[in-house]
């Protein structure tokens, strides 16, 4: 069965973001997808990258380097349960939709926490397997977001400039076109 | 007295980021600055934008819009104490240094939380007062960060591409040159 994962970050069930999520769930279900939703605020998803993300002893507690500790913990199956669960969802999904309101030209902190904590080296990439040769290169990902501003504000000659510039680091590889909801 | 604020995000006192922070504190103190440090992990700084950031009743609890609720709460002096304290530090500072390790081509989630939660509309900008006409246009800000990679990886022809591209949305206005520590 085809599987999609919607990583969703809005505080209110009455929001336009919630409506966009619901429409996506309906449309994908109709197309035969099993749809998983990670409702980050409802899950009270931990955003900050800390030693609590690792079960058991740290490799180098005197000089804690998050990425290194996480890589080892992933290899040993010692990541915290919330991270392991998100990784399990992501592994299943051919399609990943990030649904969020734009905060300071980027994803909200709670969603940046999902990126920082779930996409562990070893699991999501290695120094050999990234970009065109990436572990998840067969997956599709889409940014779907509301801006809180008008489309003209995010044009190259608008007050904020071209929306594609701040989106660039979020879509570093081969992503589908963003779904900007002005 | 001249005041500087260092917003600092590393988990370990033994890190290179901690050393960079300490050197900055020493150098600025020598130059006659009063130096404030917000050590986000040590403070267990809340990253996620939630209704808990507002004291008292919400304006529109059925349709919670973070930015709108925060703007009203700022006007009424009803922001949570941790946010009010950071705003007070920021108001005093002529110079703001963000010291962090690059996580996924951007600031760590805990620092994105500082941006999302502290830079309230009304306090940090209005629709009339932004960019060249911004409320904080007289302040200087600097990104100082470690990359976990070599300088050549972040060159225009490197595997990650030009470091200035992902930095762009973080330095949307007139910032001083970034201090990239490869």
Image (cartoon, coloured by chain):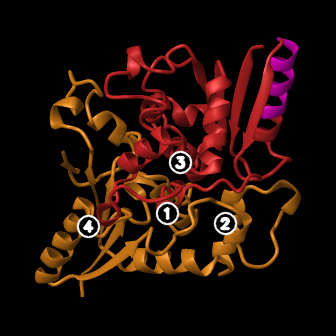
Chain colours: A red, B orange
Q: Are marks 4 and 2 on the same chain?
A: yes
Give the Cα distance between marks 1 and 3. 29 Å
Of marks 2 and 1, the one in the foreground: 1
What SS does tag 2 mark?
helix
Q: Which residue is mark 4?
A: B14
How many numbered marks are there?
4
Question: Residue B114 bears which disc, if any?
Answer: 1
Compared across the picture, whether A114 is left or right of B111 comes to: right
Q: Are marks 4 and 2 in contact (CB under 8 Å)?
A: no
C-alpha distance separating marks 3 and 4: 24 Å
Viewer-side label of 3, 4: 3
Q: Quadrant of the C terminus of chain B?
A: top left
Where residue B70 is drawn, which disc sits there?
A: 2
Residue designated by label 3: A78
Q: Mark 1 or mark 4: which comes first in sequence? A: 4
The reply to whether discs 2 and 1 touch (Cβ–Cβ < 8 Å) is no
Q: Residue at x 69, y 58 (%)?
A: B66
- Residue at image location 17% in from the left, 82% down from the top: B29
Whether residue A30 is in magenta: the answer is yes
Tell whether A12 sits left or right of A156: right
**Chain bearing mark 3:** A
Specify which label sits upstream in the sequence, 2 or 1.
2
How far apart marks 2 and 3 lie (CA) works out to 38 Å
Q: Is residue A61 magenta?
A: no
């Amino acid at each position: 069965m085809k599987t999609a994962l919607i990583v969703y970050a809005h505080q209110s069930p009455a929001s336009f973001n919630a409506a966009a999520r619901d429409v996506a769930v309906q449309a994908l279900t109709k197309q035969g997808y099993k749809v998983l939703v990670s409702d980050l605020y409802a899950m009270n998803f931990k955003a900050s990258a800390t030693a609590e993300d690792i079960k058991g002893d740290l490799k180098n507690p005197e000089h804690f380097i998050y990425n290194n500790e996480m890589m080892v913990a992933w290899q040993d199956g010692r990541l915290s349960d919330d991270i392991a669960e998100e990784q399990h969802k992501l592994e299943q999904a051919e399609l990943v939709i990030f649904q969020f309101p734009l905060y300071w030209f980027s994803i909200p902190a709670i969603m940046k926490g999902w990126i920082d904590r779930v996409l562990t080296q070893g699991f999501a990439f290695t120094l050999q397997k990234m970009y065109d040769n990436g572990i998840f290169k067969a997956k599709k990902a889409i940014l779907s977001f509301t801006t809180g501003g008008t489309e003209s504000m995010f044009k190259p000659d608008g007050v904020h400039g071209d929306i594609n510039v701040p989106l660039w680091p979020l879509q570093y590889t081969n992503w589908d076109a963003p779904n900007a909801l002005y």
